[in-house]
Image (cartoon, rainbow, N blue to C red):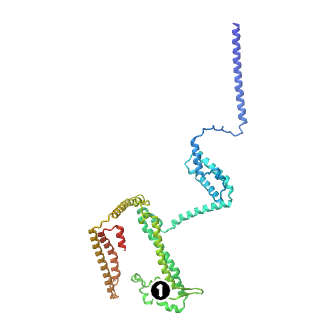
Amino acid sequence: MHSSTKSHKSTSSDGSLNRALSRRGSVLVDLMSLFRKSSSSGRAFHLPPPPKKIEDPRDEKEAQETDAFLHTESEDEENKPMTRHALLDKIRQKKEVIGKLRCQPWSMRRKRRTLRLAQKYLERHESRVSPSQRYREEIAKKWKAFCRWAANVRMYLIPWEAKIKRIESHFGSVVSSYFTFLRWILWVNLTLTFIILLFVVIPELLADAAADGTRRNRTATRKVMPAKDLATADQLQTVWDFDGFLRYSPMFYGYYSSDGYVGESVRYVVPLAYFLINLFILGYSFLAILRKMAANARTSKLTSGKAEQYVFNWKVFTGWDYTIGNPETAGNAVMANVNKMRESIADYRVKMKHKFAFLRFSLRVIANVIIFGMLALSIWAITRVVENSQHVDSNSNLFASNQVPIVVSFITLVFPNCFELVGRLEKYHPRTALRLQLG
């Protein structure tokens, strides 16, 4: 009994001792953590390093794609001697990679890796290039950008470009091509006018300004309007007939004299210059037209000849005009493409069919007889009115005094339409009929 009581007291005393020690230990731990916190308050806090991840096959694939994007070479190629121009190209490529990195649809980890590799390459190789060469490369790059900007500005300075583009969006490129052609003709005419003014008109005016009294008296009948013509010089009928002031202007060859311009140290023969400039203008006109036709033929894939292949495929896949922005015009373009395909099919059938029908031959003979009769009628009418105009008095009416231009205008206005109607009897291909009519 006594022993059990003693053992119970000893166990209770041991438990109280253990609890006291545990409380003392917890207090010591709290004190140590408090002192550690106060001593480390002035130092920066560092996160523990992230745990190492298991290698993913996608990381290796991204690394390969990044290397391909950076155009990295093997160690053997990097150790080879590289020319200065090639090194500049590599540096420029890496700078372009850095500039375009934001637009790549990549993850942020891949972008950072690519940026780090590109910057590392630049730090390692950029010191091998002198600053002057880098400046020259930058200047060349800026010059190319300026040339592109100047080309864009030049497009805004082309006359009527905006209006032609507006017409093109409403009616298609076929309609706008007529206005483009008219603008090209205007530029050609302005060039020819400038050449004539520079080499013919201005030397003649300078010769008149430096001429003596003998030359003035000799050329006064061609260059000075008589006093009797001044009263009717500004009338509409006079201007319509290119008379009055226009008759005594440098527009006509009768204004120019046969004398040479004698200066202090040079002799400029105006008649010879007039002849040579007219020949040059004729040759320049033909050359400009041929160059324009050749340029259009090179851009067209449907030109006739040995290079004509897969015509139906070209017309089907490239026949649509993507400049059209009007729904109504788009519907018309659809019908136009359908008609073109039908015309091509009909042309193909005509080529495959070599039979010659007697009825078609008869209709073509009749059509040619009618056309020759109309041509003979037009020749007779023009001859008759020319004979009558020689006996017209000055007090006659407006029709009698202008019967020749009226008859000629009527023939040129009506007869081509009649030729087109008669030409339908021949049943030619539309392209062939147009060539015959123009011929």
- In this view, the residue in front, 66 or 191, is 66
Q: Residue furthest top?
A: 1
Outermost front residue: 354
Spot occupied by residue 202 in the image (x, y as percentages of width and height): 53, 82
The residue tagged 1 is 255
User: Considering only vertical position in the picture, is 74 above or below 372?
Assistant: above
**6 left or right of 68 in image:** right
User: What residue type is disc 1 on?
Assistant: Tyr
Crowd around label 1: few <14 · some 14–19 · many ≥20 (10 Å): some
Please identify the quadrant where the N terminus is shown: top right
Q: Residue 139: horizontal and vertical position, in percent?
A: 63, 62
Q: What residue is at 58 percent from the left and 40 percent from the top? A: 56
Position of the C terminus, as image quadrant, is bottom left
Quarter residue 35 falls in: top right
Residue 31 occupies which quadrant of the picture? top right
Number of numbered labels in the structure image = 1
Looking at the picture, tell me which residue is in the foreground, 13 or 307. Answer: 307
Q: In the figure, is residue 335 to the left or right of 194?
A: left
Direction from residue 163 to residue 386 in the image, left or right: left
Up the image or down, 355 lies above or below 34; here it is below
Which of 297 and 176 lies nearest the eye of the viewer? 297
Measured from the top left, where is residue 220 in percent x and y?
Answer: 48, 90
- Would you place residue 205 above or below residue 89 in this image? below
Q: Give the residue drawn at x 52%, y 85%.
A: 270
Image: 98 above or below 236: above
**211 and 92: which is toward the camera:** 92
Q: Position of residue 279 (x, y in %)?
A: 48, 80
> Disc 1 on helix, strand or loop?
helix
